[in-house]
Image (cartoon, helix red, strand yellow):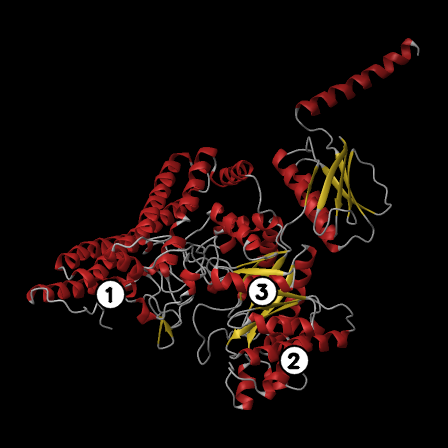
Amino acid sequence: MSRSERKTQNPNMSLFTIVTLMLYALGITRAETVSVNISIDAAPRVEFGAERLAAELKDAGFESIIVRGRQQAKADRAISITANGSAGREGFTCSMRTNSLIEISGGDASGALYGCLELARRVRQAGNWPANMNCSDRPVFKLRGPCIGMQKTSLLPGRKIYEYPYTPDLFPFFYDKQHWREFLDFLVENRMNTLYLWNGHPFASLVRVPEYPYAIEVSDDVFEKNVQMLHWITEECDKRGIWLLQMFYSLLVSQPFAEHHGIETQLSELTAEALDYTRKSIAQFVKEYPNVGLLVCLGEALRGTDNQRRFLTETVLLGIKDGMEAVGLKEQPPVVVRAHATDPDVVMPAAFEVYKNIYTMAKYNGESLTTWQPRGEWQRRHLVMSALTSNHVVNIHILANLEPFRYGAQRFIKKSVQASRDRLGATGIHLYPLFYWDWPLSPDIAKPRLRQWDRDWIWFEAWARYAWNPDIPEAADRKYWITRLAEMYGTRQAAEKILTAYNSAGECAPRILRRFGITEGNRQTMSLGMTLDQLVNPEKYRPYEDLWKSQSPPGERLDEYAEKEWANEPHEGETPPQIIREVLEFSQQAVTAIEAAVPHVTRNREEFERLRNDVHCIRAMTENYTEKVRAAMLVLRYRFSHKLSDMEEAETHLVKSLEAYLKLMELTKDTYHFANSLQTSHRKIPFSGGSGGNPAYYHWKQLVDDYRLELANFRAKIKHLRDTDGVYGRPDESTLKR
């Protein structure tokens, strides 16, 4: 090169170098390109996973492109995604072949999706291309997912419980696509793969049965919207690896059908027209929505094991077969059969003779969360069903004793998932939200109203995490939750204290209900307390004995304890004084921990204050119960001692119980709309939740006068005993005249 040539080129090269250095100094350099490679015929789940991964790479500063099949792309790095590997059902393997090549191999399309999401998570955490990406994973439980109640907190005029047509007025969220996208994204991020829609009789909102045109109970316009939305939701679920199921009760028919035939909408006995209509409705549903599963609840209205067996085998399962034949399905779609208020020893074997692809389902701790040591008759029922099939699902149902407070006791949840597998033989988890009857809104007073999956993220995430793997080592598990809570609240110092508060507070309600409650069911709103008479004379209130025989560790009820204590006999298992001591210790630990977190919270302060208030509510609720239980123990002792001093001492504890309740009322009056989500007369404890078809006794402030009257009446009883020289006769401990 001549000197003159160098003179003409050097200035240009110098300018290029200067510009490059300036751009580098300003951080304006060419972003590296990453190709995300999938097959030309990739399943929607693989497409979705690739899109999520590409979006995460873009957020991290890369240029990302999705390359299909043999398309050519010039890229600095590449990610190869396949869905035919050996990782097993929903499993995946991620391998970093070189610093610029990562391979994701899914055992199936869902596995490839989860592999993409795992890599996306690591890119998000690192804010860059991960330094190491060699991992493999697969789920332990086959089915993992929540239900949504297509139900309301109170009854509709002229209708019974569970009877809610699908309409925009009743369920605006059902028609809100953005709501569904956000909720379904939340589910897939937590590797949940099922979603159940619960309703009494959904068919009259979703299918037309030619033989029964009058059965439809929504307008033509709403019907068309319903069909379109259910198809759309099904597609959105499928590309996220989520199986959508529609639940229905037995034997319910639509209101127009019932009026046409002059029958009730909820039938305890089989009728020919109801059976034919239901079978044809199910067949039509399978034809219209072949990718939507069905969950049938045999109990509730329909009575008699033989009726339930016939309904399942001759109506439900044959209806599904009719639908299969109509659309040419060769492979039986799975159906979930919930053994509620029926005899699984009779019904389930008969069902398997007719239909093979059945998932069985039963409640975990009834309609509450009480123990990780389920036993007794309910354990036996689960084991009967899990012996029939490898597809047995536990239903984490209603959570009546946890309403309305936040619950994030991941240790309790982890042990419960382990118990579901090890003690009940389950391979699936069906999860209720914490405020089921008012989905998607939480009960908190907030503007705008909080969404349940935002408020209760840790509830959903913990069950999903352990359904995927219930055996995560403790150290790794604790590190995970501290990291997650630090992301939420800003610092590890806050996270450590909040985790302690969650775990300690979460021990209180389960222990209180299982030892002192009337029922684990919807009938009892635990956070509203109990009357002294309900503790002393539970037999008057239809106590559900499986609460302490199946849904509790071995132990003594109050009357058993009092009798043994008086007779100086040895006690067995959990005792009332033990539970009092434990729940007071746990609730105080929770309060101490949440207060210690206060100065360290730097994010989401408003939500932290709501959580903090919940912890104090649980402490006040615990004090309310423990003091009233102490009063009850003394009243029971009085039956043997005939000593007025026992009743007088009971009064002091009843006073303290009321003081704790008033504290709880103050903590909730401006923070909660409701204490419970089901606000009907089905609620009985402490008082009826409905009056004249309207909600009643759904907030703490509504019970203050009743509990004050209880104390006044008890004092009057003591005065009467004192005035009559304490003459003993079995006292009438009914302290409320209603």
Q: Which residue is depicted at the point 53% across and 48% down?
A: 462
Quarter-wise, where is residue 362 in the image? Answer: bottom right
Disc 2 and disc 3 in contact, CB within 8 angstroms: no
Q: Residue furthest top?
A: 3
On the image, the x and y values in percent for residue 698 come to 35, 64
Q: Amino acid at mark 1?
A: Asp
Q: Earlier in the sequence, mark 3 or mark 1?
A: 3
Position of residue 355 relative to residue 627, above or below, is below
Q: Earlier in the sequence, mark 2 or mark 3?
A: 2
| Pick the front one: 206 or 680 | 680
SS under mark 3? helix
Q: Circle 3 sits on which residue?
A: 384
On the image, the x and y values in percent for residue 250 come to 55, 76
| Pick the front one: 411 or 590 | 411
Q: Which residue is depicted at the point 47% across and 61% down?
A: 376
Q: Earlier in the sequence, mark 2 or mark 1?
A: 2
On the image, the x and y values in percent for residue 517 come to 36, 61
Q: Which mark is residue 314?
A: 2
Q: CA distance from mark 2 to mark 1?
A: 51 Å
SS under mark 2? helix
